[in-house]
Every structure is written in structure tokens, then in C-alpha cells.
Image (spheres, helix red, strand yellow):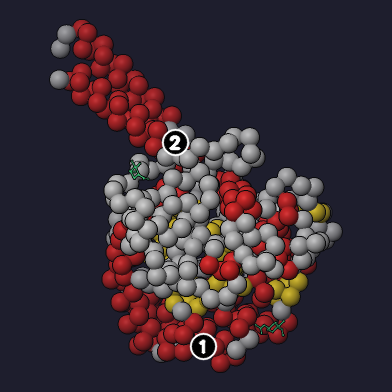
Amino acid sequence: MDHFTTHLLHISAALFLLISFNSPLSVSSIGINYGQIANNLPSPDKVVPLMKCIGADKVKLYDADPKVLKAFANTDIEFVVGIGNEYLSKLQDPDAAQSWVKTNVQRYLPATKITSIAVGNEVLTFNDTSLSDCLLPAMQSIHTALVNLKLDSQVTVTTAHSLAVLQTSYPPSAGAFRDDLKDSITPILDFLSKTCSPFLINAYPFFAYKGNSKEVSLDFVLFQPNAGIVDSGNNLHYDNMLFAQIDAVYAALDQLGYKDLPVQISETGWPSKGDDDEPGASPENAKKYNGNLFKVVNQTKGTPAKPDNDLNIFVFALFNENLKPGPTSERNYGLFKPDGSPAYNLGFSGISAGGNSGRNTSGALPPPYTLLPDNPNNGYMSISSAGRFEWENSMRIRIIVMLMLIVVV
Ligand SMILES: *[C@@H]1O[C@H](CO)[C@@H](O)[C@H](O)[C@H]1NC(C)=O
Ligand SMILES: *[C@@H]1O[C@H](CO)[C@@H](O)[C@H](O)[C@H]1NC(C)=O
Ligand SMILES: *[C@@H]1O[C@H](CO)[C@@H](O)[C@H](O)[C@H]1NC(C)=O
């Protein structure tokens, strides 16, 4: 090897080490709800790059769609699969539960990283005791099936609640469950605690604003700069409503003796469109809410009352879902339109899904993490900067490897 080559090799090696050790990021994690109440969504294999472009490392489903679970095999993205309320009655039966777990969970492990099963959605706030009475037995049967199949150490069992399980949510330190639900919720908390499973809550500051737009500060609900509020119970300062809601849940858990249960936000989001009587539903506000939410999650610190707890948040939702019933807002929570293009500019590039739109039939996908132009002065952050780092680093590493190859040749 001549002197020149040796020299170049040294430089390359030094550069390579520099790059490797300089990799800056603890990329924080955000979850996405992948709802599919629509007849115009792209196929799940097209959704894989979309998830990567958002930087999502957790996905929550409302079922256990085999097409989705297959498409996401070997992606490192974690899954919460769901069981619809209509199956709870049947799944109290241990044999039915065991066969459900085999078919919908065991079959996909370990290639698809299913980490949790959400049994039912917002069951307790339907006020339907025949449904509520099935919830815990179904959760127990599913858990027993996991134990039998030796999967209980990797898959937790939980259920997602509406924030309406709280009677009091303000001030946060006074958070308390509805009196009439305490008897049904306490054994569920006991189950979660014994099985080391998280407490899931769906929390929408949008509903608080929609219900009382004259009194509720829009900046406070959208994580925009504002004076905030001080909790008279403990003097903690809150500058956004979501954190106040989360801490109200912690206070309610504490009151029943379960202060150490981890809380996850299984749904939160903001619609980009609504009916005339849905103030606040607009692309501008959706961009502020979700953009600021991504930023807050990336700060990797917790809420005022639980600063050391990770924020575990699943945004609702990936797509606008055209077949959802209810007010217009219900069909417009998506970060993306069904064709894979952004519903508004959050800094994500989207995908050319083809789909039914016919807008771009090239089928070519853009590289991950390409950004749409974002005005740095508009007060929102650019979402994908964490992802962009990965992209830039992997480019840099590739260049170094190429350099080294050239040198060796
Ligand atoms: C359920 O009951 C609570 C308390 O009685 C009530 O406030 C709430 O509106 C009811 N919800 C529904 C969906 O009926
Ligand atoms: C279609 O997608 C390709 C690849 O991403 C892109 O180069 C092209 O500009 C797009 N065309 C339209 C009409 O959007
Ligand atoms: C996320 O945090 C990292 C490290 O603190 C920072 O470099 C990056 O800019 C942040 N990204 C966003 C989107 O705020």
C-alpha cells in the first residue's frame, strides 16, 4: 500500500468514526392511530413509507387487520391491536379468547411487533352495563390466553377510555373519576397494575373548545404561547390543556390508590374541517395543534405533575376517514388525505399512493423525510427534523463508505 493510500485510509477511518460517534439523536417516539373507516384508503404496503415519513414508531389499530400486520412485518414499528366492543361478550370465554390471540397476535409475532391489545374502546362511557360487565372478564381471558401461549411478557392487555370517565378534570390536581364508575373501574385498575399494563385515555382539547369556545382560550388548547393557568391545589403551572387533562387522570388514579399506573394518550388530535357549529375545526388550527404536539413529544419531558414520565401519545389519525358517522369533524382528523397527500402542511411530504385519485400514477415514492417548504417564522416547528437527521446521517455514512471503497480499489 503506498503512502498516499494509507493516508487516505486514515482520513476515511477518522471521518467514519467522527460520523458514527456524532450521531446525535435520541429520536423521540410518536404513535399514530391507523383507522380505516373509509372506502378510499391506499393499501397497507403503501402506508409503510408514510409512517416512516412521519417518524411514527408506534401504530394503533382498531382491529387486527391481517393486511396491515403483514405489510408492517420486519419494520420495527410497534403495534397496539384492537378488539371491537361487539366482540367483548364472546371473548369472555377462555377458548374464544385463546383462539383470537392465536389467529390475530401469535401468528404475526415476532416479525410484526405487536406489544399490546386494546380490548374495547371507551366502553365505560356508553353507560351500557351489559357491555361494561363484559369488559374485565374479556381482558382477563385474553391475558390468560397470552400466559398460556407464553406471550404475556411481550404483549400487554388494556382498554382505552374516554376522558368522560372523569367527573372532575379541573383543576388537574382535583381530577376524579365519575362516582358511578368507581366500582367498575377499580378492578380494571387492579388488573392493569398486576399485569404491568398502561392506562389508556382518549383526550381531545378540541371537544373542550368546541363546547365552550367563548371561554376556553384557543392558544391554551393549541399549545400556542399563552399565560397559562396555575393549579390552585399544588401551584403547578400549565400552559396547555392536554397536559392539564393528563394530570387530571393521574390525580384520579392517585385518588383510587393507583398513582403509579403509567398513562398513555391513546387518541388525541384536531380536525381540519367541521360543521358550522364546530368552531375551531380548520386546517390552520389542526396544523398548530398537531405540529406543536409533535414538538412537545420530541422534548422528551413529561407533564407538570409527572415530569419524569414519558409522554406516550397516539395521534388521531393517519387518514381522513370518509365513512365515519357523526359531525363533519369526525371525517377530517387525518394528517393525510386518502391519496397519501398531506391534509395540510405539517412538513411531511406524503406519498404518491395512486389510490383512487389518479393524481400521480407514477407510483414512485419520494425519499423519506423530504420536507415541504415551511416558513420558519410562522411559529410552528418543522416536524421531521429528527427524521431528517437520520436521512442526512445515512447519506453521510454512505458517502464515507463509498470513499473507503474507492481508496481500497
Ligand atoms: C352516561 O352517564 C353520565 C352520568 O350519569 C352522563 O353524564 C352521560 O351523559 C351519560 N352518557 C351517555 C353517552 O349517555
Ligand atoms: C409524481 O411523483 C413523482 C415521483 O415522486 C414526481 O417526480 C412527479 O413530479 C409527480 N407528479 C405530479 C404530477 O405530482
Ligand atoms: C427534536 O429534538 C432534537 C434533540 O433535542 C432536536 O435536535 C430536534 O430539532 C427536535 N425536533 C423537532 C421536530 O423539534
Horizontal side, residue 119 vs residue 201: left or right: left
- Image quadrant of ligand 2? top left
Q: Residue furthest top?
A: 3
Dividing the image into 4 quarters, which one contains the C terminus? top left
Amino acid tagged 2? Phe
Q: Secondary structure at mark 2?
A: helix
Q: Residue at x 44, y 85 (%)?
A: 87
Which mark is drawn over residue 134?
A: 1
Q: Is 292 situated above or below 264?
A: above
Which residue, as the protein is rendered here, is positioned at the far front? Answer: 358
Residue placed under numbered mark 2 in the picture = 389
Q: Is residue 255 visible?
A: no
Query: Residue 37, percent across and down?
Result: 45, 71
Label 2 beta carbon less than 8 Å to ligand 3: yes
138, above or below 332, in the image: below
- Please give the name of the residue rendered at 70% of the width and 73% of the height, measured from the top-left corner: 166
- Residue 302's x, y, as percent? 63, 52
**Left or right position of 149 against 195:** left
Q: How far across and down, in percent of the image, does residue 281 sit?
A: 64, 60
